[in-house]
Image (cartoon, helix red, strand yellow):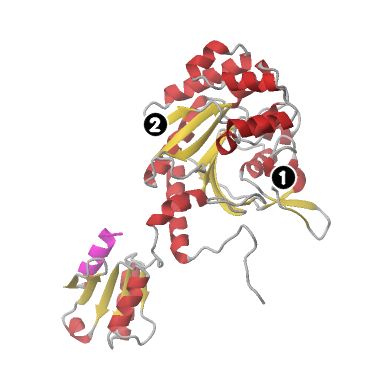
Amino acid sequence: MYLQLAKGVKDIPPEEKILKNKIVGTLAEVFELYGFSPLETPILERYETLSAKFAAGEASDALKETFKLQDQGGRELGLRFDLTVPLARFIAMNPILKMPFKRYEMGQVFRDGPIKAGRVRQFWQCDIDTIGSTSMLAEAEILQAVARAFEKLGLDVVIKVNNRKLLSGMLAQVGMVDEEKALIALDKLDKIGKKGVTEELLQRGFAAPQIAAFFELIGNDLAGLKKKVQNAQALQGIAELEEVFSLLRGINIQFEVSLARGLVYYTGTVYEVFLKNGTFASSLAGGGRWDDMIGKFMGGNREIPAVGIAFGLEPIMEVLKSGAGKKSVAQVYIIPINTVEQSLKIAEQLRQAGVKTDFCLGKKGVSKNLEYASALRIPYVVIIGDEELKLGKVVLRDMGSGIEQVLTMNEVVKLLTQNR
């Protein structure tokens, strides 16, 4: 049997999983710092939930890329393509929740789409959303959390911001009335350029003069647009952007008039996060305001305001992977020299102190064990022989510098807990 993975998925070896866990832990710490509480939703959803016009929308790439299946009862199901639609369904099914409701969720999502660096078919998203607030303070808080999270991850990023009301108003002003088709094409501007977007818009039935008039508008900055647009919806989008920018002075955000975000459910502010030096093309996070979806799931004309962002764990890992390399979670590796029973007790002493400890399980000599610890990039080794035990001490070796010290266990614990 020839073993191979399904296309677009991959195994995560320990050195990458350690990095992934570190990123997830950092994000969870930041999310909770800003008052977001954890939620978990199922990977499987009813297909009708995912395919609702106000969710993915029939024309969106997300729905085209949805993995569709049936259960044994013949029910149409789909693997979730993001964490936003399941959140909307959860809120609609739990109408007594106190608002605003602030949640974060981290989990796997699936898209049967093209594969490239940082984009696979089974991947993680890490989301924060605030439900129940129309205030631009909700946007500001989320973008503050975004800036804090990337700072803690050691990544210098720029947050590009736009507003769907502005885009919708500009499209209406030039007569491009099929907004959904136009925005899906416009969202590809960074990938296929002005020429590619123009060709796609022509194929979608838009007239060349309309396209030219629209591109003339988006060639302006925010101040320039304020003078050129007359559409009331576009002006409202400009006012919301101005408020967001005024609340976030000091954070590296910039207006990007062509930023559309392809999903149809966005209704206001939209944003994407990119590495500042441009060495990695894909966005690291993206989201926006989606005020319509939850109310439509609930039926009637209710509007439940919502705003959030999804962090792409895979692209973040691609950027950080060059600095990865630890193949073990252990902080210390114990090598007993004819002292197995006493060494086991010392290993437990270290673990009781919260030090992640690995232990030699075979009969390899000291040099082979040091090679093993070095290969796994375990930072410290404790060597325990009879002579050291008679003195009530052990040998602690720093695997980075090669320096060895003869220390008491209290001294070892103190040093290792300081260097965690």
Give the percent coordinates (x, y) of residue 395.
Answer: 21, 76
Residue span colored magenta? 411-420
Label 2 close to label 1 by CB (< 8 Å) = no
Q: Nearer the viewer, mark 2 or mark 1?
A: 1
Q: Main secondary structure of the magenta part?
A: helix
Location of residue 307 by image quarter: top right
**The one of 127 and 161 positioned closer to us in this rendering:** 161
Q: Is residue 292 visible?
A: no
Above or below, comparing residue 19 to residue 88 in the picture: below
> Does residue 261 show up magenta in the picture?
no
Per the rendering, the mark at residue 64 is 1
Please tell me which residue lies in front, 144 or 224: 224
Relative to 148, 233 lies left or right? right
Is 419 left or right of 388, judged from the image as shown?
Answer: right
Total count of labels? 2
Q: Element at badge 1?
A: helix
